[in-house]
Amino acid sequence: MGNARWDANDWGTYAKTHVTGKTAAAVFTSRDLKDAYNPAKIEFRESRDSAMNPLSTPIILASDVTGSMGMISHKLMQDGLNTLATGIYDRKPVTDPHIMVLAIGDAEYDRAPLQATQFEADISLADQVRDLWIEGGGGANGGESYSAAHLFAALKTRTDAAEKRGRKGYLFTIGDEPNLDGMRADHIRSVFGETEARDLSARDCLAMAERDYEVFHIVLANEGYARHGLDRVLSTWKPLLPERTILLEDVDKLAETVISTIQVIEGANVADVAASWSGSTAVVVANALRGLPTRAAGTGLRRL
């Protein structure tokens, strides 16, 4: 997949028909998990170079869709995907973005604990995101299965960036809850269709994903669980990603924060990146990027 490129004019036309002025229920009409997005029925998701995208960069947005977090998907559809794609094209922190969206739930309680679109470079991604089931489930187990996204990236993606160029892609998990500690063997079998599996800790899953991806978690600090339980959320994320757990104060600035993070990791100055945005966005991004590790420009992001 990923043989075309994002076009803001195409998005404008698409949004008028399918998104603008519509409620989340009208945008997301699926009422069950579809085979096309079920990890147990997916062999691989591929990000491959093409004539239109000769130096593809895989980018995964893995969003919690339990409870109130279904609104993240709605915000992505309202303008987040367009802001993300056009921002990367305009600012050029990486080449030829191929974007995948993962919908994260709870492996213990949900019927759809993980769903995965293809990697796409054009607005065909929007049709797939709209086709995901926003289950809105979750459970009373004190967290969500964010580690499933790490494991999917490790087990079920293949990219030319890694295989041809030894370059890492980007993986952002996004949500308001603590991270459950990894994936049990029975969950790995049911979610991923793996016949042989063993229990994996959150650190195990993360280490597997970090082979081919620069991994971050964005905590929606003023939403849902995190609004009253931020310390508990951070207690599960900071030990895993001490410099890559990002506190986002305004979910409406999610796309800008993702773009800015990529810019900084690719060598840009944090202050310069924050200042490049206007108005309140500059403040939100500056606060989100506080503490993010920087990399000297030109050093490259290589697989270990």
Image (cartoon, grey):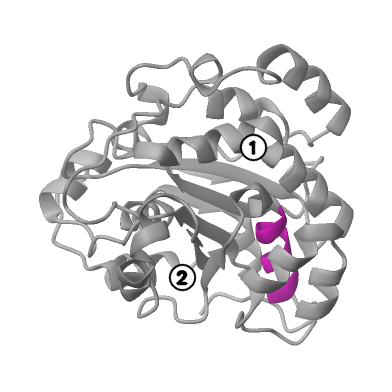
- Residue at x-position 79% and y-position 81%: 298
Residue 160 position by quadrant: bottom right
**What is the x, y in percent for residue 137?**
28, 35
Q: Amino acid at mark 1?
A: Glu
Q: For residue 281, which quarter of the picture?
A: bottom right
Q: Residues within 10 Å of mark 2 (few under 14, many from 20)?
A: some
Q: Which residue appears farthest toward the bottom when viewing the image?
A: 296
Q: Which mark is residue 40?
A: none
Q: Is the magenta region chiefly helix, strand or loop? A: helix
Residue 15 vs 115, above or below: the answer is above
Q: Residue furthest front?
A: 228
The image shows residue 82 at horizontal and vertical percentages of 75, 38
Residue sitting at 67 percent across and 60 percent down? 257
In the image, which residues are magenta?
A: 256-265
* Mark number, residue 211: 2
* Horizontal relation, residue 199 to residue 175: left or right: left
